[in-house]
């Protein structure tokens, strides 16, 4: 199983939208995919199921690893797509510094892999500390959503410095790159910020695919669906299919696509 953490330096960058729709894109391609909500705010669960606050989830397992993973995994209408909510014990995230949850996060991922999942996408809380740090330290790869706006772009070098420190804990971590989100092609500041990021980082560190700011994402969340399931969501689905293809190409050189080819 391949584990991909979706992490950012700060919140509000479209991390959950990216996680949900990318996981759905892989699942549509036939990859048995698990989307894990490791953000204490429970954004994935709230976007996809209104009962998410009642579900036993990821943080409950961190508090009590005796909980069966079968209680945590929630199937969806798509046979290859399942979820794990953040859970009722999400306040547990505040307890302990980075490394405090490492063994339990790794046990969780081993248990998920043993259940036949080929890909696990983990939506984390913003920042590189606490449980998020432990998730990254347990993952095969990380992708970094970044809003296409000037202030956000300036924080990217600091984020990459933090990731270099995490590589000490997890030498096999592959940084897939930064994915520009909330891009507004009709707004000069947005397109200029996107261009500035591409100048700042090596070409291989920035995904070619950009996620537009689109009202479809709000509608999809209101209906508890990935955007590609909407009647008029085909155009948005093409974006996430392209992003999926880029990720597969980035993983392939390391022979890490066992099972992640749809």
Image: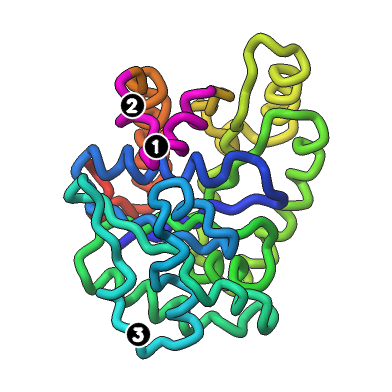
- For image coordinates 76% across by 36% down, the residue present is 153
Q: Which mark is residue 67?
A: 3
Say which of 181 and 141 sits in front. Answer: 181
Q: Mark 3 or 2 closer to N-term?
A: 3
Distance Cα–Cα, label 3 vs label 1: 30 Å
Say which of 37 and 100 sits in front. Answer: 37
Q: Mark 2 or 1 closer to N-term?
A: 1
Q: Is residue 201 above or below residue 257?
A: above
- For image coordinates 53% across by 59% down, the residue present is 42
- For image coordinates 30% across by 66% down, the residue present is 73
Q: Is disc 2 placed on a helix, strand or loop? A: loop
x then y, percent, for residue 68? 29, 82
The crowding category of the residue bearing disc 1, from other C-alpha atoms within 10 Å (few below 14, some 14 to 19, many at least 20), is some
Say which of 158 and 46 sits in front. Answer: 46
Q: Closer to the observer: label 3 or label 1?
A: 1
The crowding category of the residue bearing disc 3, from other C-alpha atoms within 10 Å (few below 14, some 14 to 19, many at least 20), is some
Q: Which residue is mark 2?
A: 230
x then y, percent, for residue 172? 49, 65
Distance Cα–Cα, label 3 vs label 2: 35 Å
Main SS, magenta region, reads helix
x then y, percent, for residue 122? 46, 58
Q: Which residues are magenta?
A: 215-231
Quarter of the rendering containing residue 237: top left
Distance Cα–Cα, label 2 vs label 1: 9 Å
Q: Which mark is residue 223?
A: 1
Q: 173 left or right of 194?
A: left
Q: Which mark is residue 125?
A: none
Check whether the beta carbons of the residues at disc 2 and disc 1 lie within 8 A of each other: yes
Q: Closer to the observer: label 2 or label 1?
A: 1
């Amino acid at each position: 199983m391949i584990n991909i953490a979706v992490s950012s330096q700060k919140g509000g960058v479209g991390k959950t939208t990216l996680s949900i729709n990318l996981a759905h894109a892989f699942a549509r391609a036939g990859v048995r995919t698990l989307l894990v909500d490791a953000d204490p705010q429970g954004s994935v669960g709230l976007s996809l199921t209104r009962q998410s606050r009642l579900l036993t989830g990821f943080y409950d397992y961190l508090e009590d690893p005796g909980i069966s993973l079968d209680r945590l995994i929630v199937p969806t209408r798509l046979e290859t797509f399942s979820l794990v909510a953040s859970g009722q014990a999400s306040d547990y995230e505040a307890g302990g510094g980075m490394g405090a949850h490492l063994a339990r996060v790794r046990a969780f991922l081993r248990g998920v892999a043993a259940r036949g999942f080929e890909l696990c996408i983990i939506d984390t809380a913003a920042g590189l500390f606490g449980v998020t740090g432990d998730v990254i330290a347990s993952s095969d790869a990380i992708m970094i959503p970044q809003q296409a706006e000037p202030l956000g772009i300036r924080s990217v070098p600091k984020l990459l410095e933090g990731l270099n420190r995490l590589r000490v804990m997890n030498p096999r971590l592959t940084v897939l790159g930064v994915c520009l989100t909330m891009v507004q092609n009709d707004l000069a500041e947005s397109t200029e910020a996107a261009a500035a990021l591409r100048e700042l980082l090596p070409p291989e560190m920035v995904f070619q695919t950009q996620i537009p700011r689109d009202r479809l994402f709000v509608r999809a969340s209101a209906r508890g669906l990935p955007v590609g399931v909407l009647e008029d969501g085909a155009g948005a689905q093409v974006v996430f299919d392209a992003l999926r293809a880029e990720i597969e190409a980035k993983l392939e050189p390391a022979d890490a696509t066992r099972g992640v080819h749809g």
